[in-house]
Amino acid sequence: MNTNNFKYFNINLGIVCPMANEKDNAEYFTKEVIERCKKYHFKSIKFFAILDNASKDGTIDIMHNLSKHISYISYLKVIFVPDNRSVVDAYIRGYQEAIDLRCDWILEIDAGYSHQPKDMIKFFNTMSKGYDCVFGSRFCLGGKFTDSKKIRFILSRGGTILINLLLGTKLNDMTSGFELFTREALNKIINKGIYSQGPFFQTEIRTYAHQFRITEVPIIYRGASHNISSNVIFDAFTNLWRLFKSRF
């Protein structure tokens, strides 16, 4: 056994994972994430699965059943939020649950294997060096962007370049999820107010995080299949302009 893994023994880990229509892999994904985390001997592991009315395929029933069988030092809480306006509300609700339960580190990971559980150790090892936020990057050395339409790659890569230019940020990837925070940093970030109702909220978070000690780790990202709507693009440019104006 790698005794170096015991360096996490005093850390309460929270895992925030919004889900929707994931019945084919929700149970397997959740178990894999928790089992991998167990190897590092965290003081506790709390997995928050957040679902709302957008999930109609029985995923919530699968997760409720699974929550009855999760044991050891882990804990699975299924949160049903029927009044969510958007997926952003699901993330914020999960973050707040983890903060309220005093999780020391809070990991955000997407279900459905767009984020790979095997990459989590990169976040843990890096955070243990004293960082406040560790962000997954598809565009730094070792990162990969796979199984996605070319337009998604162009928007993500081009968006990062534009965002860094306008906002003075310096990350290689400003539009991705998969990230790890200390409780204190995440609480201060969300208290600034998240205004986007679309994927751009990840950019808001990474922009606000620049006041903390932050870094990136390479991740393998398997792109989502859904299309990017005009509403999502409008939301992104509206909030990018708002953040740009706030610089001055």
Image: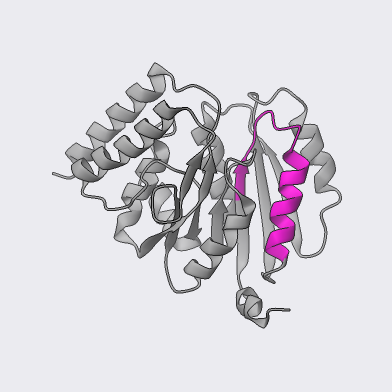
Answer yes or no: is residue 28 visible. Answer: yes
Residue 19 within the magenta-colored segment of the rendering? yes
Q: Is residue 224 left or right of residue 193?
A: right
Quadrant for the C terminus in the image: top left
Which quarter of the figure has residue 106? Answer: bottom right
Quadrant for the N terminus in the image: bottom right
Considering depth in this image, is 116 or 64 the residue closer to the camera? Answer: 116
The residues colored magenta run 16-38
Q: Is residue 211 left or right of residue 54?
A: left
Vertical comparison of 111 with 188: above or below? above
Vertical comparison of 61 with 34: above or below? above
Residue 110 at x, y percent in the picture: 58, 42
Which quarter of the figure has residue 71? Answer: bottom right
Q: Is residue 89 left or right of residue 2?
A: left
Q: Residue at x 43, y 19 (%)?
A: 229
Q: Residue at x 50, y 57 (%)?
A: 180
Residue 138 at x, y percent in the picture: 44, 47
Q: Residue at x 41, y 34 (%)?
A: 153
Which quarter of the figure has residue 188? Answer: bottom left
Picture mark count: 0
Answer yes or no: is residue 101 visible. Answer: no
Q: Residue at x 59, y 26 (%)?
A: 83
Q: Is residue 209 left or right of residue 241?
A: right
